[in-house]
Amino acid sequence: MRSTRDRIRHAISFELIALLIVTPVGALLFSKPISDIGVIAIGGATIATGWNYLYNLGFDHLMRRQTGSTRKSPAIRVAHAILFELGLLVVLLPFVAWYLQISLWEALVMDVAFALFYVVYAFVFNWGYDRVFPLPEWQMES
């Protein structure tokens, strides 16, 4: 399993790269000032960073208990990304509606758009991260 230091590197790099992409693109797509989308993105990233650490730690423990390994198949990676985003959506929806002074419906549409981006991004980022920083236990399983 990944060390605490590795999990922190993973969570921070995931969020920083995402912020560089999502803030300007979100401002353009939703016709909102970049400063407002920046606050939403940074607030969301802060919450997501903590969630990322806890979620991945729990997911890995569950995988190891269920399968004896933390190696993820493509199907498990898809489920992993979707479940992560659903959990985050529940927490962020009221914050987005409140901060942007929009309805819950508008916030849901915005959050779903961001979540769709993040599902794809999470899948690609995590796959790439695992290739750049593989765990020694995976080489023994091959």
Image (cartoon, rainbow, N blue to C red):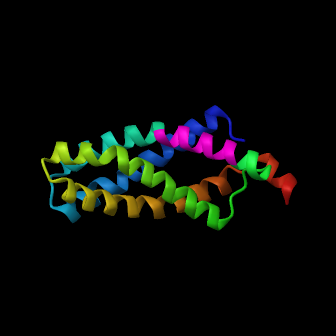
Magenta stretch bounds: 51-62
Left of 66 or right of it: where is 19? left
Looking at the picture, tell me which residue is in the foreground, 60 or 135.
Answer: 60
Residue 76's x, y, as percent?
63, 61
Residue 6's x, y, as percent?
63, 38
Left of 91 or right of it: where is 33? left
Question: Eyeballing the image, is 47 above or below 107?
Answer: above
Q: Quadrant of the C terminus?
A: bottom right
Residue 50's x, y, as percent?
47, 36
What residue sits 58% from the left and 55% below the top? 126
Left of 62 or right of it: where is 113? left
> Is residue 38 on the magenta stretch?
no
> Is residue 59 on the magenta stretch?
yes
What residue sits 43% from the left and 54% below the top? 86
Looking at the picture, tell me which residue is in the foreground, 11 or 93.
Answer: 93
What residue sits 52% from the left and 57% below the top? 81
* Residue furthest top as drawn: 4
Left of 135 or right of it: where is 94? left
Question: Eyeballing the image, is 39 above or below 75?
Answer: above
Looking at the picture, tell me which residue is in the foreground, 69 or 26.
Answer: 69
Characterize the magenta stretch by its predominant secondary structure.
helix
Q: Quadrant of residue 27?
A: bottom left
Residue 89's x, y, as percent?
37, 51
Q: Quadrant of the N terminus?
A: top right
* Residue furthest left as drawn: 101
